[in-house]
Image (cartoon, grey):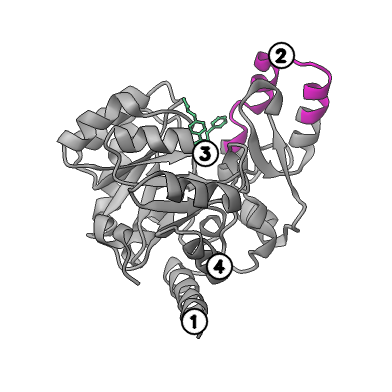
Amino acid sequence: MKTRITELLEIKYPIIQGGMAWVAEHHLAAAVSQAGGFGLIGAANAPAEVVREEIRKARELTDQPFGVNIMLLSPHAEEVAQVVIEEHVQAVTTGAGNPEKYIGRWKEAGIKVIPVIASVALARRMERCGADAVVAEGMESGGHIGSLTTMTLVPQVVDAVNIPVIAAGGIGDGRGFAAVRMLGAEAVQMGTRFVVAKESIVHANYKERILKAKDIDTEVTGQSHGHPVRGLRNQMTREYTRLEKGGATFEELEYLTLGALRRAVMEGDVKNGTVMAGQIAGLISKEQSCQEMLEEIMKEAEQLLCQK
Ligand code: TUI
């Protein structure tokens, strides 16, 4: 399947892996790219030199193109923005903010720039600033989210900009892929499905929670201070919600979640850690290699899209 995104990123399949904090490290990114999709290293809150090492390690595992996701709330965002230039990564995606001030520098260095956006206004602005594409991410996604659904956001962004649109949020199989193609998207970005990939280094407890999740098992915390985050409900989210309803300050809530994603991903503490996952978790029921996932999704999508 050829689209402007497969051309832009020089990939076989128009499937991009989300730049998930702690999860999207070099093994996963390289495996997705090696399988014909586009892998991303999630810089999250990591220092720039750690990101540089991750890029170099991914290069040892694949000669295919991959990118880096820069989380703009990170205290290291500025340095990471420079490292991706020095390391000549093919593409940068950004999340949780407006990457305007970096776009000129990245474009000059020949890097493809793909901001993740959650509104038409930011999509338009990114196009004006020279972005090559945007990821339109609905609130079905795991992690930090906006307020619109994928179903409503994607077609409105497609109508508002001329650059290609990648859909994200709530997509976990070939049906989701085909559905967003109908909305005008030229690729998908998936996160939750890749968390359970064989090549994903995520702790077995975390994978098991996703594999066993039901449709209604995710919850959004942090609405009150403007940083809504979706994850699987557990002791941590219940305590968070109790404090949030009781009027806890931003600092008190931050303290509760400090290091919580790392505890869940790396140590398997799925009770008191943060288990970020999207609403599609209930659909995800098997651990597969990235190659198996991509081939299965594309086969299903192509069958659906080619039906007369
Ligand atoms: O960034 C993500 N997902 C993330 S980042 C993350 S780490 C984190 N953890 C706790 C709190 C905050 C961050 C976990 N998951 N997705 C991309 C995304 N970007 N979703 C929504 C947005 C977004 C929202 C508002 C982008 C821009 C924006 O407005 C910026 C502006 O200035 O207009």
**Which residue has dot 1 on it?**
303
Q: Which mark is residue 118?
A: 3
Which mark identifies residue 280? none
Please, what is the three-letter code of the amino acid marked with disc 2?
Thr
**Nearest the camera: 102 or 201?**
102
Which amino acid lies under the numbered mark 3 shown in the image of this protein? Ala
What percent of the width, then of the height, locates residue 43?
40, 36
Q: Residue at position x 49%, y 40% from top?
A: 21
Q: Position of residue 252 (x, y in %)?
A: 70, 16
Q: Which residue is under mark 2?
A: 249
Q: Which mark is residue 173?
A: 4
Q: Main secondary structure of the magenta part?
A: helix
Magenta stretch holds residue 127: no
Spatial CA span between label 1 and label 2: 51 Å
| Left/right of residue 29 with respect to residue 281 in the rendered view | left
Q: Amino acid at mark 1?
A: Gln
> Element under label 3?
loop
The local crowd at label 2, few if under 14, some if 14 to 19, many if 20 or more residues have their Cα within 10 Å, is few
The magenta region covers 241-261
Depth check: 162 or 75 in front?
162
Q: Which one is in front in this view, the residue at disc 3 or the one at disc 4? A: 3
Q: Image quadrant of residue 9? A: bottom left
Q: Earlier in the sequence, mark 1 or mark 2?
A: 2
Alpha carbon of mark 2 to alpha carbon of mark 4: how far?
39 Å
Do the residues under discs 1 and 3 have CB atoms within 8 angstroms?
A: no
Nearer the N terminus, badge 2 or badge 3?
3
Mark 3 Cα within 10 Å, few/some/many (few <14, many 20+)?
many
User: How many angstroms separate mark 1 from mark 3 (CA)?
Assistant: 30 Å
Please name which of the two marks, 4 or 1, marks the residue nearer to the observer: 1
Q: Quadrant of residue 42?
A: top left
Q: Earlier in the sequence, mark 1 or mark 3?
A: 3
